[in-house]
Image (spheres, rainbow, N blue to C red):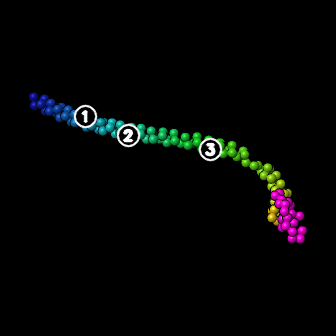
């Protein structure tokens, strides 16, 4: 009988140890689940923030593309290299630095007339000879 009591006592001790281990495992599992839930919430928040950032970047890129297209359209109105050279040739041919002002023409006329003042005024510019 004593052996049965001893065995029963051993079984009970082992059962209590197993219950204790099972309780510890249950607590650890609960903690792991809580940590996973918190990690999931954190990840969800980060994903939402990243999605917002991506939307903003897409909007910025769209605006940048539109602005670049506008710049390209405006660049079409700029003078080309050949056109600029044609303008440069005309300017050099006219040589606007040799034009005289109305006042200079009047002074030249005065000198030629011998000091008499001119009554008519010339508004157009004349080329100096």
Identify the residue under disc 1: 22
In this view, the residue in front, 103 or 67, is 103
Q: State the residue lying farthest toward the left.
A: 1
Q: Is residue 101 left or right of residue 29?
A: right
Region in magenta: 105-129
User: Does residue 98 appear in this view?
Assistant: no
Q: State the residue lying farthest toward the bottom.
A: 114
Marked residue nearer the N-terminal end (3 or 1): 1
SS of the residue under disc 3: helix
**Above or below: residue 50 compared with residue 11:** below
Please name the residue shown 85% across and 64% down the image: 118
SS of the residue under disc 2: helix
Q: Which mark is residue 39?
A: 2
Give the main secondary structure, helix, strand or loop, of the magenta stretch. loop
Identify the residue under disc 3: 67
Give me the C-alpha separation between circle 2 and circle 3: 42 Å
SS of the residue under disc 1: helix
Residue 106 on the magenta span: yes
**Above or below: residue 114 compared with residue 125:** below
Callouts 3 and 1 close, C-beta under 8 Å: no
When asked about the image quadrant of residue 10, the answer is top left
In this view, the residue in front, 64 or 128, is 128
Crowd rating for badge 3 (residues with CA inside 10 Å; few <14, some 14–19, many 20+):
few
Please name the residue shown 38% across and 38% down the image: 41
């Amino acid at each position: 009988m004593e052996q049965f009591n001893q065995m029963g006592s051993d079984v009970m001790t082992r059962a209590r140890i197993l219950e204790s281990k099972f309780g510890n495992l249950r607590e650890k599992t609960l903690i792991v689940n809580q940590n996973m839930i918190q990690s999931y919430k954190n990840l969800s928040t980060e994903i939402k923030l990243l999605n917002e950032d991506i939307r903003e970047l897409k909007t910025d890129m769209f605006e940048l593309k539109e602005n670049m297209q506008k710049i390209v359209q405006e660049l079409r109105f700029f003078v080309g290299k050949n056109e600029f050279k044609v303008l440069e040739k005309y300017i050099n041919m006219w040589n606007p630095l040799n034009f005289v002002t109305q006042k200079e023409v009047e002074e030249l006329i005065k000198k030629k007339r011998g000091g008499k003042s001119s009554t008519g005024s010339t508004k157009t510019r004349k080329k100096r000879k």
